[in-house]
Image (tube, coloured by chain):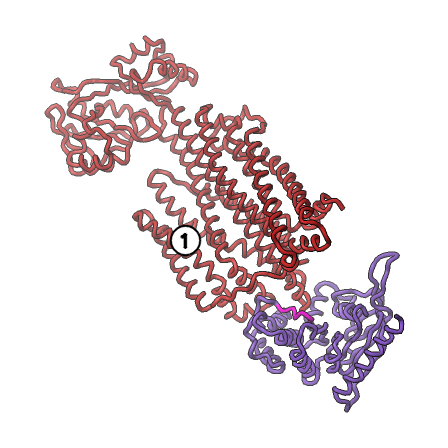
Chain colours: A purple, B red
Amino acid sequence: MSVILEVQNAEKYYGNKGNISAALNDLSFTVSEGEFVGIMGASGSGKTTLLNCISTIDTLSAGRVLIRDKNIADLKGKELDRFRAECLGFIFQDFNLLDTMTARENIALALSVRGEDAAKIDDRIGDIAGLLGIEDVLDKFPYEMSGGQKQRVAAARAVVTDPELVLADEPTGALDSRSSKALMESLGKLNSERNSTILMVTHDTFSASYAGRILFIKDGQIFTEIVKEEKESRKDFFRRIVDVTTVLGGELDEIV
Amino acid sequence: MRSFDIALKNIRKSRSDYSIYFFTLILGVTIFYMFNAVGTQGMMKEAMCSSNAAVQNFVKVIGMVSVAVAIIFGLLIIYANNFLIKRRKKEFGIYMLLGMSPSKVSRILLYETCIVGFFSLVIGIALGVVASQCLSVIVAKMFVMDLSDFRFDISGRALVMTLLCFIGIYIVVFLLNKRSVRKNKLIDLLTAAKKSEKTVLRNTGLSVILFVISAACFIYVWIRIGFFGEDLTRNGFLACIVIGFVSTFMFFRSAGGFLQKACSSCNSFYRRGLNAFVVRQFTSGIGTSSISMAVISLLLFLALLFFSTGFSIRNYVNTRLGNITPVDITMDLFSLSPEAFFEENGIPMDEWAADHIQIPISKGSDVTVSALLGDHEAEATENFRMADWGAMVGVMRLSDYNMIEDMYGRGRLRMEDDEYAFILDFDLLGEIVNRSLEEGNVLTVSGTELHPAYDHVIPECVLMSGLEANLGIVVLPDRVLDSPDCTLEVVSNFIAANYLSEEAGDRMTGILDEIGENAVFYTTKKSIRTSSISITVIIVFVVLYLGIVFVISSAAIIGLKMLSDSIDSASHFTILRNIGTSGPERKKALFVRVFSFFMFPLVIAILNTLAGVSFVKGFMSSIGMINMGQGIVLSLFIMVLIYGGYFLTTYEGCRKIVGI
């Protein structure tokens, strides 16, 4: 399996002279094609900073992020925009749908921005909507949908372009438990049926249990990593995640 | 931190929010000062030919219009301020959450108002002083005057008026702000930002129908007024205005839905790049503010109509003055021997007249208005209740009258020995007399029957007059007046002359004034010019004043709407960036949105104006005014200047808000 994402010795500092705090501290990992990776950690552990740096929204202070062997720090201007449009898909905690447009138009925009042929757009939207179960809401505006539906529309927009890497930032953060379940099942489907590579940041154990591998981050470093076994059920994987988070929390207690 | 420092910081921080507000305040002060100052300036006195009464009239009329303008500006400033306060409610909430007392928050607001007010007044008045001087020069150029005694001055009266008016407005603004801080609950202040306008979902099917109806109404009104405007009755005209008014509102109500429908059904356009996003933003924006857009469009329409007709009146006066003042002076001298009269009064003709003609005017009971009206007297009485139709009309011999024609540079009259002609430049009476002449009304003078030489009155003046409402002259064949049986008697002498020099002329008219109206009635080129110009100066200025204020109001309202929309849609542009839209593309999307919001009501207003102007043109050419071209060009120039300024300021502000 080819490597899609490679983070090498990433460091990120905030603040100015004399008052520096490190959000990422010499952090490295790789993500291969077709993987569903979860990143977990407490607030302030640096997971959102990491995602921002991978998604080109923020830049690293030191180290490199390679996507398909290309250093994203080298991308400038138009190249960067093209890279965002073609290689990355985003899913945010607060959906970030354009509220003046219908679901269909929101999804179509991601395609038309890439200069997709107008005639093919509807077919592709139909495919992805079928997979995510949002055919009924395609012609509704965001304010006419439930949170779960909005997030699945956002997911559809993120993957309709078949990006190399889908970045999800707390996708279930604003959803109730039932919607969370539906969304995570959808993301799981995208991963298994469309072979989408997904990198998801979350602090919700339940959501994380849908991933295939989980990185735990603490103080800007990778604390530990667990991988779902071949035959392991999601329930068992969930228990293992809970165990690790307890250890993470336990360590914190020891310090106090 | 002191309240004053906080106030100063706040203003500096939210410069892009304040830009439109500040721009409007400065423009308001400038315009207000400029128009109030220009009346008291030396140039204006010159324009009114040193006539004090005319200048006072001007100042009075502009003062009255200024009251209306002050109210408009007051409302506009309060509107703009509300926008700013809405933006900042959360900030006030945080101040209070941190334990600042409402009175301290009010103090911050007071300082802010003072700072903004002070700078806007200083800059505005400085610009106003310069602008009013420029305006004076333009007036001088407009009415072809000498610029030699031009001097720089500042009008104390205008200064006081401007200060009073705007300080008053600022005080009201402050009191309103203070109230909005005190009256609102903390929770409302803190969550105000989240309550954005709800997207109004328009029924697109209904919109399409409404759009088609309103477009059809527009076209009907345009054709009706534009091409057949002259034969509209008053009710028909009123109906057109009402239809136009209603369809404007209907148009803006439905345009959003219609455009959305039209664009989204064209897949190859809609599904390219950011087109879908831009269209949605535009149509939803129009949808939520259709009423204000319609009002703005009507205001712009009025402004454009004002400009183009106002300037055309100016053109008309300048060209018409040449036509109606062919000589320096004309007089009706109630003396049978003019030479002796002038000698007696110490102003012999050869001392002031370069060339002159002198024609006896006869009157008699045979030639009265009544006789000329024939069977149409009753009709005339209906129109002119106060008139005395028994009044005798002056009579001239044909050969004498043709001397006037020669001197005025007009074509000679031709008529047979048994004919007569009626010279009358009073259109309203002329229309009725025309009917009588068409029927061949017979005039019997001293037993001789005479027939009309023409089937209409000759619309020429004998005595020059700015009003074109002389009682007229009847021209008879020489033989009728020369015959010994003639019952008409010479009552006065008509004299037309050109001066040797302006000074000689002024001295002569000075003496005539002393003698009084019982002996002589005269009109001069100079006096006609004076009265015509002072009336048109007033019209042009009022029209310009109101027009500019309307343009400012419309542009400011659009600008503020765009700014507040940008705040709501700042997150949209972040999303666009994340899905890979390039910077230039996003910039273009924002530009197109701001541009189309500014252009949409303007385009409708321009279309309306074209129809309106072609009607006004028909109306004006019927009373002798033509040449609207220059007026339209000038008005477009003013529009572009103010409107364009607002557009650029708004675009810059929006760009900063959405962060591209």
Residue A34 visible (yes or no): no
When the figure is inspected, residue B274 is found, relative to residue B58, above or below; the finding is below
> Mark 1 — on which chain does it sit?
B
Horizontally, is B571 left or right of B344 in the view? Answer: right
Expressed as whole percent of the image width and height from the top left, the position of residue B140 reads: 50, 30
Q: Quadrant of residue B358?
A: top left
Q: Please give the name of the residue rendered at 41% of the width and 60% of the height, measured from the top-left corner.
A: B215
Q: Residue furthest bottom?
A: A231
Provide residue A164's location: percent of width, then percent of height.
72, 76
What crowding class fits label 1: few (fewer than 14 Cα within 10 Å), some (14-19), or many (20 or more)? some
Can residue A124 be seen here? The reply is yes
B245 sits to left or right of A201: left
In the image, the segment drawn in magenta is A92-97
Residue B554 image position (x, y, % from top left): 52, 49
> Which residue carries the number 1 mark?
B245
Q: Looking at the picture, tell me which residue is in the foreground, B517 or B331.
A: B517
Q: Nearer the viewer, residue A69 or A6?
A: A6
Relative placement, left or right, of B270 versus A241 is left
Please check the rendered image and state whether residue B626 is part of the magenta-colored stretch, yes or no.
Answer: no
**Residue type for callout 1:** Phe
